[in-house]
Structures are given as C-alpha cells and as structure tokens.
C-alpha cells in the first residue's frame, strides 16, 4: 500500500528538475509566509485597524494586477527559467530592504506599504513564468497534474509552518528577524534553479506586438468557455470570500484576546487544512471530475467561515480554522490544475497572466472592502456573510460550469 501511495501521490518526484524545484521552493515559501504574517501583524499592532490591513494587502497585490498581462507576454516570449532567477533574486533584495528598515527602528507605515508594492511588481512577472514552467520540469506528461497538485501542497505546507513559526519569532525576536529569515530562504530556491538542466531556450519565431498577443489571449479565453468560467469564478472568490484573512488578526487580538503567537496558530491551522486538501487533490485518480471537487471545496470553505465566525473560545476555533483551510486554497489549486491541463501550449503564459490578474486584481479590492465593512459591522458578522456568500457562489457556478458550451474548444483550437 505504501508503494502504491508513493507511485500515485508523489510520482512527480521521478523528475529531477521538479524535485529540485520543489525542495528549493519549500524552504522559500516558508520564509514568504513568515514575512507575510509579520507584515500584517506589524501593521495591525500599529494601527488596530482592519481597514489598514486591507490597504496593506491592496498595496502588495494591486501592482501585480496592473502588470500581470505584461508578465504573461514576457513569460511566453522569453526563457521562464531566466525570468524566475531574476524574480527570486529581486524578491530576496526586497526582503533585505524590509529587514533593514524594520531593524533600524525608524520607519513609517507608508515605507512598508511601498516595499510591499515593489514585491507586487516582482510577482507580476514571477507567477506567469513559474506556473507554466512546471511543464518544462516534468518529462512524463502523465505526471503533470500530480506535479501541479504537489506544488500547491508545498505552498500549503509553508502556510502551515510559516505563520506558526512567525508567531513565535515575532514574540521572541521581532518582525525584523522574520524578514531576515525570508531573505535567507531565497538562497535555497536560487540554488535549486542553478542546479537544474533544461534544453536551450528557443525564442518564438515571430514576435507580435504586445497588444496583438494580449488580444490573441483574450480571443482564446472568449472562445474557451471552460477556462474563462473558471477565471470568473476565481474573480468572485477573490473579491468576496478569500479576503477573510483580513479579519484573522482581529479575531486573534480582539475576539480571543491573544498576541502574535495566537495569530500564528490560527493561520497555521488554516495552513494545515489547506495541506490536507491539497494532498487529497494530489491523490485523486485520473478521470476524476475536478470541477465537482472545486465546487465542493468552496462549499466547505463557506461552512468553515460560518463556524469560525461564531466561535468565541480559542481552542474551539482552531478546528474551524482547519475547515477554512481545507476549502480556501483548494479552489485555487484545483482551478490552476484544470486550466494548465486544458490550455493550449502556446497560450499558457498568457492564460496564467489572466488568472493572476483575476486573483491579484480582485483580492486587494476585496481586502479593502472587507476591511472597511468590518469596521462598521464587526469582524464576526462580516465573516458570517462571507461564509453564506461562498455557499451561494458554489451553487451558482455549479450550474454555470456544467452548462453546455455553444462552441467546442477543439473547434477553436483548429481555427
């Protein structure tokens, strides 16, 4: 039985490049989640405002929205391997600057927001290159879905370890040390990239104007209903549901009267649930209807948000946080798996840029909206409404995703 599990759940590790990538990214992602947790806690500790947390997330993510389409074009034109090397080095420099700023003891909120915006610019080029590059790391394309799922599992493992570790470090040493750890963690992913072996990059024979390539990508999505509906679903989730994490510091400090460690434990519990969900996704058999898996995870997210919003006793809230995690990242992981498997090879970079635009465009706006609403009606009632909305979204898209398309994707691809 162990052999069967190894052959199914972890079969993508048969590919050397992917194993190196997974190892390096695992270390780096832990540092990334430590930094993310520390920034949110520092801002909330200074301002005691959920609206300011929303503004912080807006500053980090909105630049990615503005530049993600350009990032998709760059990912389809140039070597994704070299793009990743540049973005990882740039991210390390950003973490070093953030650490130096906080450790100096003389900083303003706008300075932290500005460095967050710099990271948003970097991510606009990193995400469209990193996601499709998994295709280049996996020799046997039957391992592709498993590799994408394990990629998500790696992020969720970091989401479990990073915030919990960050909470402890914040209490003992302060935010500056969290940022230093993140900067050092990038050495792992940079080293893993340098150890990989790829075939020489062959640039596209014909380079069109950027506007023409973007128009081509929009035309492709317009006539590929299965993918475009998933992107619209991600937009709805990112705007209305996923910004629930804006409210978590309020629960940690106000509802549960805790500290940075409390916040880290809640976020870690959410990461544990997400990790379980992603490993389950990695283990599903070929032929499984992933769209049903996607809709079910959104409904689970809604239930978790409703239960967590009603909790006033911290130990009781942790199991509900695990349920939230089980349903929160899984929709994104499942959608990316479906999209990457179904998108045309020459369109993957641009398609992923539209996915990034949907996520990075709606999430910061949602964070602003949720933060400001919670200031008026309270964090518990705001999260309760998000849970109800999640269940309604799952029901609505349950009908839309299975509506018969007017024109098949195969017909469009042959045009």
Image (spheres, helix red, strand yellow):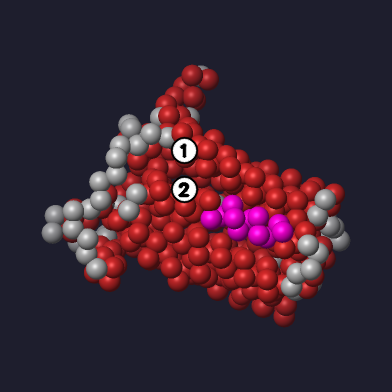
Q: Residue at x 83, y 50 (%)?
A: 173
Is 34 in the magenta?
Answer: no
Judging depth in this view, the residue of 127 and 4 nearest the camera is 127
Residue 85 - label? 2
**Label 1 near label 2: C-beta < 8 Å?**
yes
Q: Residue at x 59, y 55 (%)?
A: 93
Q: Which residue is mark 1?
A: 194
Label 1: few (<14), some (14–19) or many (≥20) C-alpha neighbours in 10 Å: few
Q: Earlier in the sequence, mark 2 or mark 1?
A: 2
Q: Residue at x 22, y 61 (%)?
A: 207
What secondary structure is the magenta-colored segment mainly? helix
Judging depth in this view, the residue of 221 and 310 nearest the camera is 221
Find the magenta span and give its range.
90-100
The answer to whether 92 is drawn above or below residue 236 in the figure is: above
SS class of the residue under badge 2? helix
Residue 334 - label? none
Label 2: few (<14), some (14–19) or many (≥20) C-alpha neighbours in 10 Å: some
Q: CA distance from mark 2 to mark 1?
A: 8 Å
x and y, in percent, of residue 406 in the image = 21, 64
The answer to whether 133 is drawn above or below residue 113 in the figure is: above
Judging depth in this view, the residue of 181 and 226 nearest the camera is 181
């Amino acid at each position: 039985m162990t052999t069967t599990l190894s052959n199914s759940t972890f079969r993508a590790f048969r590919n050397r490049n992917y194993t190196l990538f997974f190892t390096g990214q695992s270390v780096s992602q832990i540092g990334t989640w430590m930094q993310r947790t520390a920034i949110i806690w520092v801002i909330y500790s200074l301002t005691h405002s959920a609206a300011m947390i929303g503004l912080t997330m807006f500053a980090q993510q909105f630049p990615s929205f503005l530049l993600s389409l350009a990032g998709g074009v760059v990912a389809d034109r140039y070597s994704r391997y070299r793009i990743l090397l540049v973005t990882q080095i740039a991210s390390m420099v950003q973490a070093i600057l953030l650490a130096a700023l906080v450790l100096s003891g003389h900083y303003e909120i706008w300075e932290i927001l500005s460095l967050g915006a710099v990271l948003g610019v970097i991510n606009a080029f990193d995400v469209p290159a990193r996601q499709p590059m998994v295709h280049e790391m996996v020799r046997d394309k039957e391992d592709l879905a498993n590799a994408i799922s394990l990629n998500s599992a790696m992020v969720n493992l970091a989401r479990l370890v990073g915030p919990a570790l960050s909470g402890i470090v914040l209490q003992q040493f302060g935010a500056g040390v969290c940022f230093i750890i993140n900067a050092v963690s990038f050495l792992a992913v940079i080293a893993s990239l340098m150890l990989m072996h790829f075939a020489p990059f062959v640039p596209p024979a014909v380079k069109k104007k950027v506007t023409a390539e973007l128009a081509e990508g929009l035309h492709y999505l317009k006539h590929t209903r299965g993918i475009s509906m998933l992107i619209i679903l991600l937009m709805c989730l990112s705007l209305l549901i996923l910004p629930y994490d804006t409210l978590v510091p309020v629960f940690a400090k106000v509802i549960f009267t805790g500290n940075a460690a409390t916040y880290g434990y809640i976020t870690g519990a959410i990461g544990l649930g997400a990790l379980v969900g992603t490993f389950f996704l990695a283990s599903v058999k070929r032929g499984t209807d992933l769209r049903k898996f996607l809709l079910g995870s959104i409904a689970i997210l809604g239930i978790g948000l409703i239960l967590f919003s009603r909790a006033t006793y911290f130990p009781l809230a942790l199991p509900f946080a695990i349920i939230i995690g089980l349903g929160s990242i899984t929709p994104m992981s499942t959608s990316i798996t479906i999209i990457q498997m179904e998108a045309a090879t020459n369109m993957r970079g641009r398609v992923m840029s539209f996915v990034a635009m949907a996520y990075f465009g709606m999430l910061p706006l949602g964070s602003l909206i949720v933060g400001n609403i919670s200031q008026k009606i309270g964090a518990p009632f705001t999260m309760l409404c998000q849970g109800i909305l999640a269940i309604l979204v799952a029901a609505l898209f349950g009908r839309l995703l299975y509506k018969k398309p007017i024109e098949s994707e195969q017909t469009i691809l042959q045009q």
